[in-house]
Amino acid sequence: MTDKEKLQIFRETGALLEGHFLLSSGLHSNVYFQCAKVLQYPKYATLFCEEIASHFANLEIDLIISPALGGILVGQEVARLLNKKSIFTERIENVMTLRRGFEISKGERVLICEDVVTTAKSSREVADIVNQLEGKIIGIGSIVDRSNGLAKFDYDFFSTIKISAETYTANECPLCQKQMAIEKPGSRKIGKM
Ligand code: ZN
């Protein structure tokens, strides 16, 4: 798939909204992206995860690990395509934790999967868990890289597409200056697809 085809799928499924948005951080942006909207459709999950799976397919991998919640669908699909185990971490009182009896054995070769990498915080926390258990990190695969080039890892980092978004404080937002109505994502009804 080309970037253009991917963006088209994101727009059609309502995953990618363009306009004037109030983000949960309080910043304003011209773009809002919600990966869960595209992953609603298993056929699209497969299409995007196939790219991640094929990027890492020639490496020896024992298991896939993802951070809850968004990463789980991606990890599970990549694991299905590579016929590997899939486990996930979750945040308990804000601390990333491996629960549910999931285990990583010393020396196991682990691929981290994400839906969207923005600040890379979740990926780094998952990597810390793998390292503490003495697993070996093979790489990080993500559907979208939204970090504007800021996500840098010591591991092979592959994303199927980069989506850049401009963010502004309310005071310096050019969209506010144009008096464009602002929307809070999640409260908007998606119209025509
Ligand atoms: Zn604004």
Image: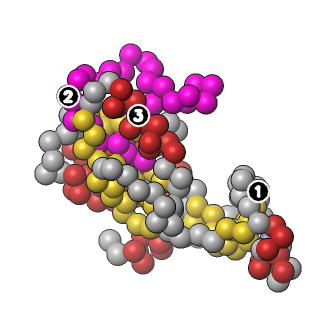
Q: Name the residue under label 2.
A: 107
Asked if the residues shown at circle 1 and circle 3 are in contact, with their CB atoms under 8 angstroms apart, the answer is: no
Q: Mark 1 points at which residue?
A: 26
- Image coordinates for residue 128, horizontal then vertical, percent: 40, 34
Mark 2, ligand 1, within 8 Å: the answer is: no
Circle 2 SS class: loop
What residue is drawn where x is 44% and y is 44%?
Answer: 123
Q: In which quarter of the image is residue 127?
A: top left
Question: CA gap, disc 2 to disc 1?
Answer: 42 Å
Q: In the visual, does 30 lie left or right of 129?
A: right
> Mark 3: which secondary structure?
helix
Residue closest to the far front: 154
Q: Mark 3 points at which residue?
A: 128
Part of the protein shown in magenta: 89-114
Query: Is residue 189 positioned above or below 181 on the image?
Result: above
6 left or right, relative to 180: left
